[in-house]
Amino acid sequence: MRPQTVSPVLATLGEHNETYTDDQILNMFIAACHRSTYTIRNYRIAINKFRAFIGNKSLRDVTWREIEVYKLGLIQGFFSKNNSPQAPATVAVYIAPVRSLYKWGSDPNINIFTKNPTTSVRTPKVSVTSRNHYLTKNEVVCLIQQLKRQGLRNYMIGLTLVLLGLRVSELISIESGHFHSDPEESSMWLTVYGKGGKEREVKVPPMLWRLLEPYIQDLKQNEGQRDQRIFPITVRAVEKMIQKAREQWGVDKKVTPHWLRHTNATLALLRGASLQQVQESLGHTHINTTQRYLHTVQQIKKAAPDYVEDSLKDHI
């Protein structure tokens, strides 16, 4: 029988884990997380925000009461810079890393926390606000043209977002080695590293690859290019890029990079892609998430009033 290997992180957890400081616990949790660099940074910020709230109390001594008070404080805006109430989605973003920390630490194999104080804590319901956050075909063309005026890189970033439906965090993590051809060398694919360290394969349309291939080759030939990412910029830089294009275009819609992901799903379904195809391409864990776009598509194609008009238009 082959001996079982033990994770270096778990190997540090002995019988006397009560001697670990909160800093050490946080560092071990972060080391055990299989998340993107961007997500890890946000996890650390959120957990340290909670630690600042509990003051001198150890993470081990926290009960559901502290977490509930913290949640209510977030909702009412006590911990924001301008003391304004926080949206449900924002509250959920700050609570989720704390929940993950205690779920990890209360696992019997970890056993840092004797119990998980977050099991009875409910986060506010986050309403779906993305239903109409998509661009029409002509609007996509206008936005992409504005990005093209900004330069080749920005043009390719816009095309990559709308054609592949990537999250911005996924986009800026792309490396040249993540592209590969299929066994018959008939098409190119991109290995995407999404939420929770999950991998998925997304097909790269030929028109996009014709732009990316020479761009990537130029990066490889640049000896000073140490960063292996093909778009070594920040999420905020991409947001500003889209904002500038939107302002130059003069559209009233408050387009963000994530709108291009919604647009990808909407256009794909309109053109006949199946829910499963869109789910796999976007990396949705649950099909219910993808079905939200189907509702929009069904409204666009033909709504109930259209059928009523069909039945009456020859008589009124």
Image: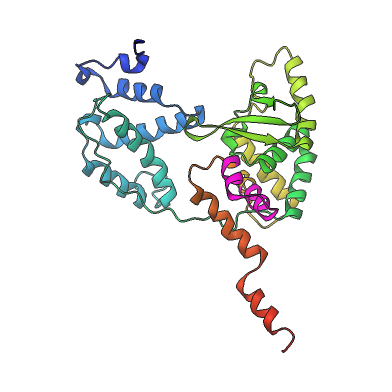
Q: Is residue 120 left or right of residue 168?
A: left
Residue 38 appears in view:
yes
Q: Is residue 278 left or right of residue 110?
A: right
Against 297, residue 4 (above or below) is above
Quarter assignment of residue 133: bottom right
Q: Position of residue 299 (x, y in %)?
A: 62, 64
Whether 271 is among the magenta residues is yes
Q: Nearer the viewer, residue 140 or 273?
A: 273
Q: Is residue 236 left or right of residue 40?
A: right
Q: Is residue 233 left or right of residue 102?
A: right
Outermost residue toward the bottom in this view = 316
Q: Position of residue 236 (x, y in %)?
A: 59, 36
Against 26, residue 254 (above or below) is below
For the point 23% across and 29% down, which residue is it? 113
Boundaries of the magenta span: 262-281
Q: Nearer the viewer, residue 99 or 291?
A: 291
For the point 31% across and 22% down, which residue is it? 23
